[in-house]
Image (spheres, rainbow, N blue to C red):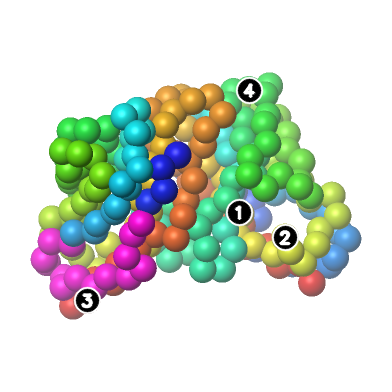
């Protein structure tokens, strides 16, 4: 059972470089999310997509863009990476929004920006 | 959303019940209590959630006090694989309101 798949697992960038983090889910979920987790901290929401064709900002959207390519895929783009974006990035999905929503997470992408 | 307070860390002996407390004294009537855990280097995993009644599933039990100001997550027979950070989250559902993960409790299950 694949669930939520994130690629790559590790990435090192130089300041100013760009890259796209990929996320795909095979559970036919409507909603998808991108979180970041800094060392020793909880998760902070970057962007989310409540359904195919929609995206909205979360708590920390600056410096990122997202694309909900189709129902399965939700990508996160860093246009000009900064050292402050060094973090572990988690993608998540859920079947439906609502009080009984359960998020399923990928295994994360560890990003270092030098 | 109501603020939650959890101990920073706890230990538990393998095979014993692990009782993880969460204080949410400012919780409002329409806020749910959610528990997730994060095993080292992995993405968080949903455990259980509830509104006012106690809940049980194959992973854990959730006990919510009658005044709803605190709750306890119970892992009935902790194993070494239950070593993780456990997040207690209180949230009222609305279209723009997302799950917010705070510091959590680092549970260490010891042999």
Quadrant showing the N terminus of chain A: top left
Figure check: A66 above or below B75: above
Spatial CA span between label 3 and label 4: 44 Å
The numbered mark, 4 or 2, whose residue comes first in the sequence reads 4
The numbered mark, 1 or 2, whose residue comes first in the sequence reads 1
Q: Are marks 1 and 2 in contact (CB under 8 Å)?
A: yes
Q: Which structural element holds mark 2? A: helix
Residue B110 is marked as 3
Residue for point 57% across, 58% down: A37
Dot 1 corresponds to which residue? A36
Spatial CA span between label 4 and label 2: 26 Å
Figure check: A100 above or below B47: above
Residue for point 20% across, 65% down: B79
Find out whether residue B16 is within the magenta segment: yes
Q: Is residue B39 visible?
A: yes
Q: Are marks 1 and 4 in contact (CB under 8 Å)?
A: no
Spatial CA span between label 1 and label 4: 22 Å
Residue stretch in magenta: B5-18
Point out residue A19 in the picture as x, y percentages from the top left corner.
Answer: 79, 52
Q: Which structural element holds mark 3? A: strand
Q: Are marks 4 and 2 in contact (CB under 8 Å)?
A: no
Figure check: B72 above or below A99: below
Q: Are marks 3 and 4 in contact (CB under 8 Å)?
A: no
Dot 4 corresponds to which residue? A52
Dot 3: chain letter: B
Dot 2: chain letter: A
Dot 2 corresponds to which residue? A85
């Amino acid at each position: 059972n694949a669930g939520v798949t994130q690629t790559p697992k590790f990435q090192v960038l130089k300041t100013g470089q760009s890259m796209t983090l990929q996320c795909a889910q095979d559970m036919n979920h409507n909603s998808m999310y991108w979180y970041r987790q800094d060392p020793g901290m909880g998760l902070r929401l970057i962007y989310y997509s409540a359904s195919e064709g929609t995206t909205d900002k979360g708590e920390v959207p600056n410096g990122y863009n997202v694309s909900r390519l189709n129902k399965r895929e939700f990508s996160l783009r860093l246009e000009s990476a900064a050292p402050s974006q060094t973090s572990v990035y988690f993608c998540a999905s859920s079947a439906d929004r609502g009080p009984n929503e359960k998020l399923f997470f990928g295994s994360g992408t560890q990003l270092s920006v030098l | 959303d109501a603020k939650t307070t959890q101990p920073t860390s706890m230990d538990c002996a393998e095979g014993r019940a692990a009782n993880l407390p969460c204080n949410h004294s400012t919780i409002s009537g329409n806020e749910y209590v959610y528990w997730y855990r994060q095993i080292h280097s992995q993405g968080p995993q949903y455990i259980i959630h509830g509104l006012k009644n106690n809940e049980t599933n194959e992973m854990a039990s959730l006990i919510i006090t009658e005044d709803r100001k605190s709750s306890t997550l119970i892992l009935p027979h902790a194993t070494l694989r239950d070593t993780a950070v456990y997040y207690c989250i209180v949230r009222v559902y609305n279209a723009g309101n997302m799950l917010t993960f705070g510091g959590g409790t680092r549970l260490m299950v010891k042999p």
